[in-house]
Image (cartoon, rainbow, N blue to C red):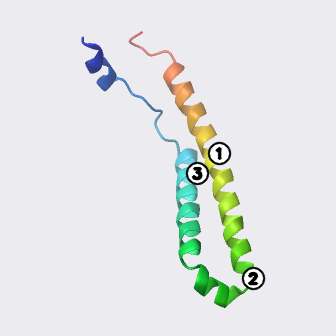
Amino acid sequence: MPIWLDFLTTPMAAPETRGLRRLRYGWQALCLTLAGSIVAQGPLREFAGRVAPAATGLLLVAAVVTTIVYLGAKHRADTAFLTMPRESD
């Protein structure tokens, strides 16, 4: 079998578990909320005053931390999946 065909038939990532899916959805929600708070910074400042930039900064920190946690969990799951012995081996 040519090597390119072997790559096409080899899974390159682990199946997504419920926990990883939940973490990914939470991360996506944080990113969208952060983007929305940046776009709507003017109206947010009128509504919440000086708290608006701090809230946006808090969302940024939460998104960065969640990104690090998610990427670490995804990397561990992929590594475990790709190093597990297969029945065909």
Task: Reply above or below: 33 against 19.
Answer: below
Q: Residues within 10 Å of mark 3 (few under 14, many from 20)?
A: some
The number of callouts visible is 3
Left or right: 57, with 80 as reference point: right
For disc 2, the neighbor class at 10 Å (few under 14, some 14 to 19, many from 20) is few
Disc marking residue 50:
2
Disc 3 marks a residue whose amino acid type is Leu
Q: Nearer the viewer, mark 3 or mark 2?
A: 2
Cβ atoms under marks 3 and 2 closer than 8 Å: no
Q: Quadrant of the C terminus?
A: top left
Where disc 3 sits, the SS reads helix
Residue located beneath label 3 in the image: 23
Nearest to N terminus: mark 2 or mark 1: 2
Residue at the image point whose x is 68% and y is 59% from the top? 62
Return the mark for residue 68. Answer: 1
* Amino acid at the residue labelled 1: Ile
- Counting from the top left corner in percent of width and height, residue 78 is at 52, 31
Report, in whole angstroms, how far the alpha carbon at label 2 lies from the one at label 1. 29 Å
Residue at image position (59%, 62%) is 30
